[in-house]
Amino acid sequence: MIKVLITGATGLVGKEIVKQCFEQKYSVHYLTTSKAKIVSKKNYQGFYWNPSKNEIDISCLEGVTTIIHLAGASIAQRWTDKNKINILKSRVESASILFNLLKNQSHQVEQFISASAIGIYPHSLINFYSENTKEKSTSFLGQVVSEWEKSANQFTKLDIKVSKVRVGLVLDVEEGALPKIVNPIKFGLGSAFGSGKQWQSWIHKTDVAGIFMYILNNRLKGVFNAVAPNPITNKELTKQLAKLLKRSLFLPNIPKFVMKLILGEMHILLFESQRVNSKKIEDLGYQFKYYCIKPALENLLK
Ligand SMILES: NC(=O)c1ccc[n+]([C@@H]2O[C@H](COP(=O)([O-])OP(=O)(O)OC[C@H]3O[C@@H](n4cnc5c(N)ncnc54)[C@H](OP(=O)(O)O)[C@@H]3O)[C@@H](O)[C@H]2O)c1
């Protein structure tokens, strides 16, 4: 039986990957920073780690052939200096702990699949980014993602296949960005941000997990964008949601300075624009369940 070790398995993307692992009859080991989240079941076994203290339960590796690394402190928190350090360290140090463990232990790991993010691409209203894009964003997030990908690359030194999955805006009804966008619209307070022309390269949670599973099952290595084939603008997303929720949008767009006052530096998450292309994974045979925003939102908000 295939056994996968997942970090960040308890988060939005992780839970969906765990679900798809079970559907495919894979066994899951996972590392968690929270002892309260440790579960011991036949095919689902939790192990404690604390990357900031270099602590890890080494038995997490037993029988594991693939590691999926999703762990990282949320970027949706105020970007204070302390939080910024934690956002970076929680991704890079955790990868390094795994690297050192594999370097010093005998193991069967053949593949390391790391989450990454489309925040690596520079802000642009015009560009359509593929994995071949050489330019990298110099923003805080861009720098975090570059370091995160570098920390994944080190596993090649151990002859392990490395894949980096540049995740877009994951849509889920309970967690992530969608509930935060939906709630003001429900209360009649929804409106687009800024010009509303910024691109949102969204992906349904089923497809983001589906892409991780596809990479695992086909032993793919390299960089892959995990976004749906049809990105939309912020204005279009807001309009589609209002239509589906049967609400009208009567307020003017929310200006950037207002969101900066409310959210601080993190406000750029709402105004950054990355139009990202999913062609590479499609050409390799991945079939999306949700190509367009309308059925994706209908499925999530039903
Ligand atoms: N959701 C999106 O739209 C999106 C977009 C682009 C990229 N991504 C990236 O994809 C990955 C998975 O996303 P997600 O939405 O599933 O994230 P999430 O829901 O925030 O879950 C991340 C998990 O990481 C672990 N974690 C949190 N702080 C940590 C720390 N300081 N050190 C080590 N582990 C820590 C937590 O697991 P435990 O409590 O069990 O330790 C948590 O469940 C993240 O790295 C995220 O940045 C997500």
Image (tube, rainbow, N blue to C red):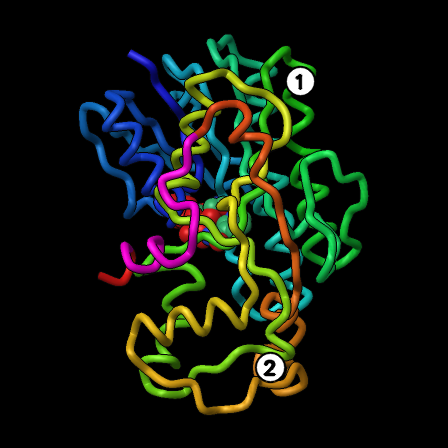
Q: Residues within 10 Å of mark 1 (few under 14, many from 20)?
A: few
112 left or right, relative to 16: right
Q: Which residue is mark 2?
A: 259
**Mark 2 and mark 1: Cα distance apart in space:** 41 Å
Quadrant assignment, res 53? top right
Going by the numbered disc 2, the residue's amino acid type is Met
Q: Earlier in the sequence, mark 2 or mark 1?
A: 1
Q: Residue at x 56, y 59 (%)?
A: 200
57 left or right, relative to 256: left
Q: Can residue 72 be seen in the rendering of this structure?
A: no
Q: Is residue 231 shown above or below 207?
A: below
Between residue 176 and residue 264, name the one nearer to us. 176
Going by the numbered disc 1, the residue's amino acid type is Thr
| Magenta stretch contains residue 163 | no
Q: Which residue is mark 1?
A: 156
* Residue 45 coordinates in the image, percent (x, y): 27, 29
The magenta stretch spans which residues?
A: 287-299
